[in-house]
Image (cartoon, rainbow, N blue to C red):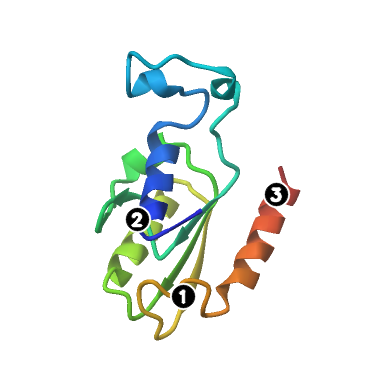
Amino acid sequence: MGFSAGGILCGEMLLHFDGQTDGTALDPDYVPDALDAVSADAAACGMIYSFYGRLSVGTTDVELLRSGNLPPTFYCYGTRDPFYDQFLANADAAERAGVSVERLQLDEMPHGFGARGGWITSYDAWLTEIFANQ
């Protein structure tokens, strides 16, 4: 789960560095340790006013999203967010890529709403359902 740029970072990890990837993928001098034996796979992803892509640009590349074998993804965004159209386009592309997508739109909420807007209860229920089916 990540908020804004934190969600983009979570998405980058899920798209390119999940599974048994260790630090040698980024730095050939990295020395793996016991923690590297733990899978970096995720059962779910929470994009809270965020999206898969790069800073300020949500991807609509369906093949990229499909190649990431992404987990079910919860999008929560406000209608007054300047990235609103990008949230919609990214979630649409994720669905076309076969990702299970849940959307929660918060009317009149801006970017950076944090814990406001009553979304946490819905996210908790969604996560509980995802984890119950693992």
Q: Is residue 66 above or below residue 52?
A: above
Q: Are marks 2 and 1 in contact (CB under 8 Å)?
A: no
The label nearer to you, 2 versus 3, is 2
**Image quarter for residue 121?**
bottom right
Whole-percent x and y of residue 114? 47, 71
> Is 104 displayed left or right of 111 in the figure?
right
Residue 116 spot, x, y in % from top left: 51, 78
Q: Residue 131 carries which label?
A: 3
Q: Which residue is drawn at 33% across and 14% down?
A: 28
Between the residue at mark 2 and the residue at mark 1, the CA separation in whole angstroms equals: 19 Å
> Looking at the image, which residue sits at the far right?
132
Task: Judge the density around disc 3: few (<14), some (14-19), many (≥20) Cα neighbours within 10 Å.
Answer: few
Residue 8's place in the image compared with 83, above or below, is above
Q: How far apart are marks 1 and 3 (CA)?
A: 23 Å
Residue position for label 1: 105
Q: Nearer the viewer, residue 38 or 15?
A: 38
Q: In this view, does 35 lie above or below 92?
A: above
Residue kind at label 3, given as amino acid type:
Phe
The residue depicted at 41 percent of the width and 81 percent of the height is 109
Where is mark 2, residue-wise? 5
User: For the residue marked with disc 2, what is the amino acid?
Assistant: Ala
- Tell me whether the residue at label 1 lies in contact with that at label 3, contact meaning CB atoms closer than 8 angstroms: no
- Could you tell whether 80 is left or right of 23 in the image? left
